[in-house]
Amino acid sequence: METSNKRKRIYTENNLLQSGIILFLGTLLSSIILSYFNESEFSSRVTRFNDFTLIHFIAAFTIAPVLEELIFRGIFTRKKIFKYVMYLGSLLYIILLQNYYLIPILAIFIVAFELNRSKNIPYHIYYINAVLFGLMHYEFNDLKLLDTGIGIVMTSGMGLILIWMVLNFGLIYSILLHTLNNFVAVAIIVLGNETADMTLKKVETQDFTMKYQRVSFFIKNGNMEVENNKSLKAENMSISNIHNALCSDEKLDDLYFGKFNVSIERKSNSTKKLNCESFHQLLNKTDLKEN
């Protein structure tokens, strides 16, 4: 009788795995297709890669998986301490990222979890947790974007897979799987940068000439000089850093992953200032923007 019940419990948990795999792979395929056939706005989760550094790269598959598994999946180990880690950790996460729209969803999860008195956790609790995990990666303004909808479903699907790992194998294994997932995802992006064209290129407008060259992601940050609003020279810098120097009050909504050598010179027959507008005019002529 005990063996039969155990098999039934494992079968139910396998439904979480199956649902998670379908959601994750389905949205991953949709994301790949979308990237080839549609150039839409990027969510804040994606544009964070504009400021991606070697420290972020390491943290993505070391610190992040451990913290997120302790906060979001530790509660399913049934150890009481992880319940409070989930409640307080999620709230702190929301406050730090200023994603206050998630407070009602967190409240729904807490109420549902506290009201459950059965030995087996109902499925809706697992799914609320997974959706909260998916939404936690996005700002409220991101919700209007198609890219965000796909990302939420994909991350929620991974959340279901990780819950299944905790229930069947333990928290350590979910951390290891989360680490592997993050490493592969970030490594693909970095590998794409390292194998990209790194030749020196040039574009120009009526007033400025810009030379640019992609460099290795693993080179230490260099320096940047802006002279009298007429020229700029940056070595081993992200486009985000250059953008911030010229467009201090404007957010960079496009994705320019990696580091670059960039030099901008005003033409001798021009008196126009090198500012945010002229920089964007030059950027739009380059092939740096990611699709």
Image: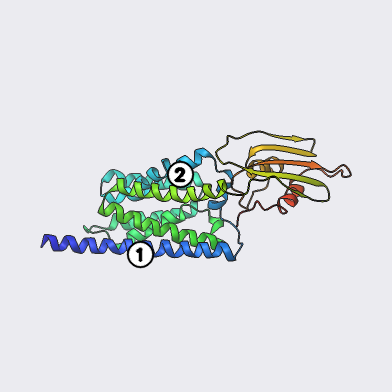
Residue farthest left in this picture: 1
Quadrant of the rendered image containing residue 6: bottom left
Q: Secondary structure at mark 2?
A: helix
Indicate the quadrant containing the C terminus: top left, top right, bottom left or bottom right: bottom right
Relative vertical location of residue 4 with respect to residue 269 in this rendering, above or below: below
Indicate the quadrant containing the N terminus: top left, top right, bottom left or bottom right: bottom left
Residue that badge 2 annotates:
60
Residue 273, percent from left and from top:
81, 43
Check if mark 1's residue and mark 2's residue have beta carbons within 8 Å.
Answer: no
Q: Seen in the image, is 183 located left or right of residue 232?
A: left
| Disc nearer the start of the sequence (1/2) | 1
Residue that badge 1 annotates:
19
Q: Seen in the image, is 123 located left or right of residue 64?
A: left
Q: Secondary structure at mark 1?
A: helix
- Residue in the image at 49% along x and 55% along y: 101
Quadrant of the rendered image containing residue 63: top left
For disc 2, the neighbor class at 10 Å (few under 14, some 14 to 19, many from 20) is some
Q: Nearer the viewer, residue 240 or 96?
A: 240
Q: Is residue 151 in sight in this rendering?
A: yes
Quadrant of the rendered image containing residue 243: top right
The amino acid on which the numbered mark 1 sits, given as a three-letter code, is Ser
Residue 181, percent from left and from top:
41, 51
For disc 1, the neighbor class at 10 Å (few under 14, some 14 to 19, many from 20) is some
Q: CA distance from mark 1 to mark 2?
A: 25 Å
- Residue in the image at 70% along x and 52% along y: 286
Q: Nearer the viewer, residue 217 or 94?
A: 217
Q: Is residue 108 in sight in this rendering?
A: no
